[in-house]
Amino acid sequence: MLTGDLVRVKAGKGELTPSFVDPVAEKLVARAEELLTLFREGVGRRRVDLDDDVKLLVGDATDHKLVNGLVKVLTDRSEFDVSAPLPPAEIRAKVFRLATLRGPLSPPDLEIEGGRPTAAAIYRELAAELGVDAAALEASLYADHADQQVLTTVDVPSARWLLDRYNVALVQAVLLKASELRVRLVGAGPAHVRQLVRAVKFHQLICEVLTTPDGYELVLDGPASLFSQTSRYGMALAKFFPALLLQPGGWEATAKVSWHGTKTMKLTPALGLCSHYRETGAYETRESLWFEERFRALDSGWALDRDVRPLDQGGEGIVVPDFRITKDGRTAWLEILGFWRKGSIERRLKLLKRHGPTNLVVAVSKRLAGEAGELPDAVVPFAEVIPAREVLKRVELIAR
């Protein structure tokens, strides 16, 4: 994810446009290749050394903000690990304890026989006591600090991929400041709507799904609309965006963004943004997986089915349940909500009261509250695990 100081945008007249790069421009591809090569050849080196190489590469270039943004994407797609012959935290504790006993220490260049010990003398004494090499001990001392960790893998397949990923990262960084994101789906079939809504649920976003004359509209709360947990929610919204790019049909996204006032960012497939997510169609939260496991273990005779269709609510909206629960010709539905606000829950319950379905059980996470407020009695609250027995009781009462 790009940090705020690396975001490149154009703002004016109430609109905000990310400064996208051309992923096939020769100069940019060459620059991206240069950076990718630097990272690939840097496997096995410390992060601090890699950072120094990047600074030398950037130098006095005029595109330093872009280059540093590409480096941030590369770093996020890389893995760094501790490489030390001895456990750093344990060695540090022993070194500090011995230095306290022998201190105060002399500067490194004032090591005098019979005088105060230096750090090097402490390393030698402890190494002899532990039966290890003094150089290995010193090398291990701070090896677990971030700048001393060693690059192990770089998961970036090509320069073109890096530039495409950078463009998407620009949008994601802007969405961290959004108060609302509206997504219009034109001509989308129920299967594609269900897939996108499942992505919304996977990222546990607050969302209202409306019907339009030519399709559907998803209205998602942005992090700037919440009173609490804004950082966590903002990251969830940003991570959702690449899933939208997988939609095969026509779509249009409009975000209200707090950026030196309120501005609008508009996005369409015409921008050529490419998702780095794989088209798997499988968006399953851990809450839904845990619930399925526990509900089946009850052996109640009720069958669970994930292949559910969107349910129309009188033209005012639709609901896409997570599960259909059936037995002896009777049916109930279960919808699992992640992040929530008091207002969003109230709107949903009012819509259910007016248009149904009356056989829907709503489970709401207590730990993902976007603002203070008590949950209504009509929902099943849960912390980490949805109470399967409580859901079963509701199902047996309202199934029809």
Image (cartoon, rainbow, N blue to C red):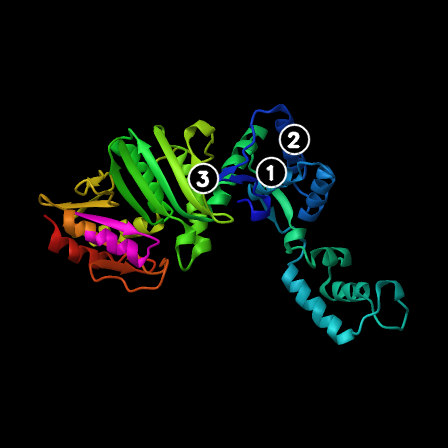
User: How far from the left and from the top, in percent, is residue 273?
Assistant: 47, 31
| Residue nearest the viewer, comparing 263 with 182 | 263
Q: Which residue is mark 3?
A: 265
Contact? badges 3 and 2 (CB < 8 Å): no
Considering the numbered disc 1 on the image, is that residue within a helix, a strand or a loop? helix
The answer to whether 219 is drawn above or below residue 141 in the figure is above
Q: Is residue 297 left or right of residue 114?
A: left
Q: Does residue 61 appear to the left or right of 4 in the view shown?
A: right
Mark 2 closeness class: few <14, some 14–19, many ≥20 residues within 10 Å: some
Q: Closer to us: mark 1 or mark 3? A: 3
Q: Which residues are magenta?
A: 332-350
- C-alpha span from label 1 to label 2: 10 Å
What residue does disc 2 label? 31
Q: Mark 1 is on which residue type?
A: Leu
Question: Is residue 337 within the magenta segment?
Answer: yes
Q: CA distance from mark 3 to mark 2?
A: 28 Å
Check residue 70 in the rendering and tell me which mark sits there, or answer none.
Answer: 1
